[in-house]
Amino acid sequence: TAYFTERPSAQHRRMKSSPPPPLSPYGVFTGTLFQYSSSPSLIAFESLPPPPNNDDNICKNKCILIGGLSDGPIPTPYTKLLETECHNLGWSLVQPVLSSSYLGFGHGSLARDSTEIGKLLEYLSAHHDAEQFALVGHSTGCQNSIHFLKHGQEDVVGKVKVVALQAPVSDRETEEDHSEFISHAQKLVAQQKGEEMMPRSAFWAPITASRYLSLLDMNGEDDFFSSDLTDEQLRERLGHVGEKKELDLIAVYSGKDEYVPSFVDKEVLLKRLVKAMNNGVEEEEEDDDGQVESGKGGNARGLMLEDANHNLYKSEGDGARFVSAVGRLLSRW
């Protein structure tokens, strides 16, 4: 009797010798997964504070973490730090999946996102004992937060007490020339074909003509933070922040954000953004960490992290400084 053993393939040998994947790089989370919308079907994950900060398993303060383009839950390296800070202060951390999460943003809009964020907050109010909310936006999550404050359902928006904008940068301002594809997208929209997809070479992800213009055209729906907007244009987009009677907002900008072109003066832009949110109020002093913090006279203030990159993972301590700044606002509520 002859026995034949199949020789392992090169791919099989590589698989056997490959090291295991790293443990969840941005942290491991324990909590409750729930469906907050059935049409469309959307889920979120909530991690509650452990005892003694939550002996009765009820938490009335909810911090909502909203990531940027292509993000989902656990969008940033500081997510676990944020969860810990929230728990120490008696807040839970909620991480939603929106229709725009992952690559869904390419056929979405800020309006759709605001509707879904509103559904989440309504669900948390009805079923998870929520009374107060904080919104922490990273990258395009900043546009989401600003848009929701203006266009969300009034009674739900009134429960938002804290907003933190981490990396509120412009998608439109880049070193690249998008004029050819902007023209193509404009023609599609003019022909009532805004939901048609752009050519593969237009963007790094599948995207409709309408969303392409929202992100990359002057005065697009997402165009909140561009440095070439006039002060008046910035106030039109951001001034509603200063009209909120019970709201604390901090805008945190990274001095070495790789998605901000070199021609943008980041410190000047941050001051202009904060001034627009505060309807012209402009002050400046240092915070507890020795970081420049501007806008102390209104609802909004700014914080510049000089050596930080876009998602705060390169320079040691930047994530912790951002989370500490958020915690100071949460502690007021």
Image (cartoon, rainbow, N blue to C red):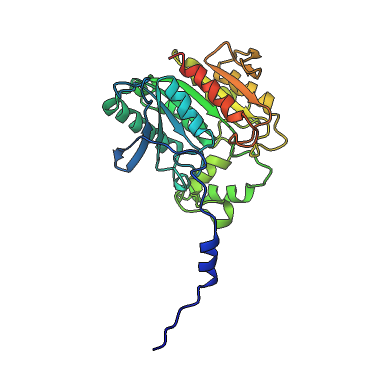
Residue located 64% across and 35% down the image = 309
**Where does the image place residue 88, in percent across and percent down from the top left?**
44, 21
Q: Is residue 278 visible?
A: yes
- Position of the C terminus, as image quadrant, is top left
In the image: residue 256, left or right of residue 111: right
| Quadrant of the image occupied by residue 277 | top right
Outermost front residue: 1
From the viewer's perspective, is 243 left or right of 257? left
Q: Nearer the viewer, residue 72 or 296?
A: 72
Q: Nearer the viewer, residue 162 or 77?
A: 77
Q: Residue pushed farthest bottom?
A: 1
Judging depth in this view, the residue of 63 and 172 nearest the camera is 63
Quadrant position of the N terminus in the picture: bottom left
Residue most toward the right?
A: 263
45 and 99: which is toward the camera: 45
**Looking at the image, which residue is at 29% across and 21% down?**
56
Q: How many marks?
A: 0
Q: Is residue 45 above or below residue 185?
A: above
Q: Is residue 74 left or right of residue 280?
A: left
Against 136, residue 243 (above or below) is above
Whole-percent x, y for residue 125 in the image: 30, 25
Going by the picture, which residue comes out furthest to the top?
297
Q: Is residue 248 visible?
A: no
Q: Position of residue 9 (x, y in %)?
A: 52, 73
Residue 152 locus on image (x, y percent): 39, 27
Residue 219, picture quadrant: top right
